[in-house]
Amino acid sequence: MAVEVKLVAHPVGRAGMILLGLTRRIIPGSFLQEMVETGTMESRNRAIPDDSTARYIMHELLHPTPYADVNAVLHDFLRSIQAILGKHLRGMYLSGSLALGDFDPRSSDLDLVVVTEDALSHDLFVALQEMHARFDTSGSPWAAKVDAVYIPQDALRHSAPTLEHYPQIEWPGALFLGPLESGWIFQCSLLREHGIVLAGPDPRALIDPIDADEMRRAVGTIPLMWLEQAHHDPSWLVWLRQRREQAFVVLTLCRLLYTLDSGAVTSKPAAARWAEKVLGPRWSGLIERSRAGQVEGGETPEGDVNDTVALLQQTVDRFRQWSTSPADPHQS
């Protein structure tokens, strides 16, 4: 019997069926998998939706983003990862700016989260490492611009990072085993609320709800670390004098301030637009130049280096102010 639902569309996964939004029907996952593998829309005596809905399903499966070259890379990765992990694969998701709708091909990378049934063996890690290395030397314009983490479903359930080591890659490096980043809670929230399903169940089924104040409490970790480095580690200031790195710092601070205010996550461009309005003219020029610096590169002017450290201090001050009165996230 046809069941009408009203949910956001997600591609089919291991859960065995998919809920198609805006009055789409529940479609058996095995049938969708066959459509992907054979390219046929023939029902083979199965109850399926009308042709227009079936075409919509195929479009969502084969075109998860508006960028043809990105879709080709994602499908190649999915096929390769499925071939390596087999039954160990729980799901694969697209995160980052593509999920948030602020992707810029000139400066953005591709952020993948691969969820596994359990911890991966050394042999599987080596196979994944070799697969990523082949892609990095493939000549693709996206080579060395893929960030990925492979995490067991039990570890993903709760957003707090652990001391365990997981396979991950941060371009332009190779796949390595390491602990989750200090801002992992923000990645979990982004994935849960905005992640694009390439394979597997809805990420909300894998990640517990994240409390807004838990997000705010996590805001201080990164700016406190950077402020310490700015005052005591000359090499950090050398790193900051690279324009793209300075832009990364400023736009990350905008995102953290947005989270402190709202208890939610947003993209760097959206956070920058928000910060220009909320923080006022004192910081709008720095933010605007940093947005341009993401693409232009070069050396950071000394004035912008000093202003970036000042914005870093401002972020730490706002976080400390919130920490003393967490009932009110809005700071002056």
Image (cartoon, grey):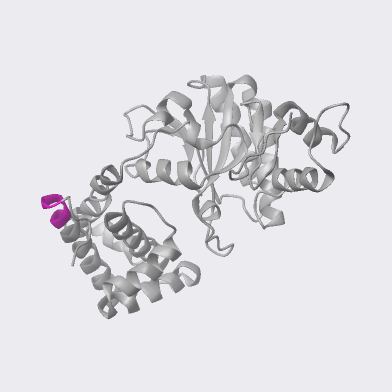
In the image, is 59 to the left or to the right of 320?
Answer: right
Residue 324 is one of the magenta-drawn residues: yes
Q: Is residue 138 visible?
A: no
Residue 189 coordinates in the image, percent (x, y): 41, 44
Q: Looking at the image, which residue is at 70% across and 38% down?
A: 25
Note whether 14 is above or below 259 in the view shown: above
Name the foreground residue: 244 vs 279.
279
Q: How far across and down, in percent of the image, does residue 295 sit?
A: 50, 69
Which residues fall within the magenta stretch?
A: 320-325
Quadrant of the rendered image containing residue 46: top right
Residue 119 position in % (x across, y down) = 48, 21
Q: Quadrant of the N terminus?
A: top right
**Which secondary structure dominates the residues rendered in magenta?**
helix
**The one of 192 and 135 positioned closer to us in this rendering:** 192
Q: Quadrant of residue 14?
A: top right
Is 24 left, or right, of 171 in this rendering? right
Give yes or no for residue 179 being in the magenta stretch. Answer: no
Q: Is residue 8 left or right of residue 73?
A: left
Residue 80 position in % (x across, y down): 68, 33
Name the one closer to the observer, 284 or 189: 189
